Image (cartoon, grey):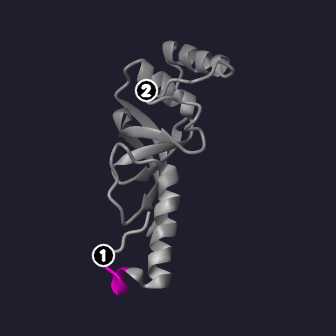
Amino acid sequence: MLGQYDAGLKEIPIEKVIGSVNRYYDFDDAFLPRQTHTRGRWENIDKAFLCDVTLPPVKVYEIGSFYFVKDGNHHVAVAKEKGQKFIDTNMIIIEVPYKIDEDFNINSLILKKELAKFYEQTNLANLHPSVHIK
């Protein structure tokens, strides 16, 4: 990782929210809950949405041109379900020296960071450029 910094309050396109931090198992690819035990939370946010209640910004990490929810997963789920185009966020930008696409998994960031550290410590890329470790 190159670094991270707080970018403050930002409005982002909701279609660029592609994952969740530590809650990836709770939401599917469409950002709908995979289980029923949090249904009440989803319904409360849906009611607030229908009543035009302003919800607090969700907390996201920006990595490349995509976003991962740190806090506010149900808010994002309801907004996506309702067809909302943009959402307010408190954003932390994480700079990485890797290409990020829709298939990126935030957990793979940890693996990539460890791989980069391994290559740096062993100098393997310079000693044996044809060798690639996964």
Residue holding disc 2: 30
Q: Amino acid at mark 1?
A: Ser
Residue 120 position, x and y percent, is 45, 80
Can you say which quadrant of the picture contains the C terminus? bottom left
44 lies left or right of 61: right
Q: Residues within 10 Å of mark 2 (few under 14, many from 20)?
A: few
View extreme (right): residue? 37
Q: In this view of the protein, can residue 55 be seen by the observer?
A: no
Vertical comparison of 129 with 80: above or below: below
- Give, as a single range, the part of the protein colored magenta: 125-130
Residue 60 position, x and y percent, is 49, 45
Vertical comparison of 2 with 48: above or below: below
Residue 83 position, x and y percent, is 37, 20
Upstream in sequence: badge 1 or badge 2: 2
Q: CA distance from mark 1 to mark 2?
A: 39 Å
Q: Residues within 10 Å of mark 1 (few under 14, many from 20)?
A: few
Residue holding disc 1: 130
Given residues 5 and 98, the one toward you in this image is: 98
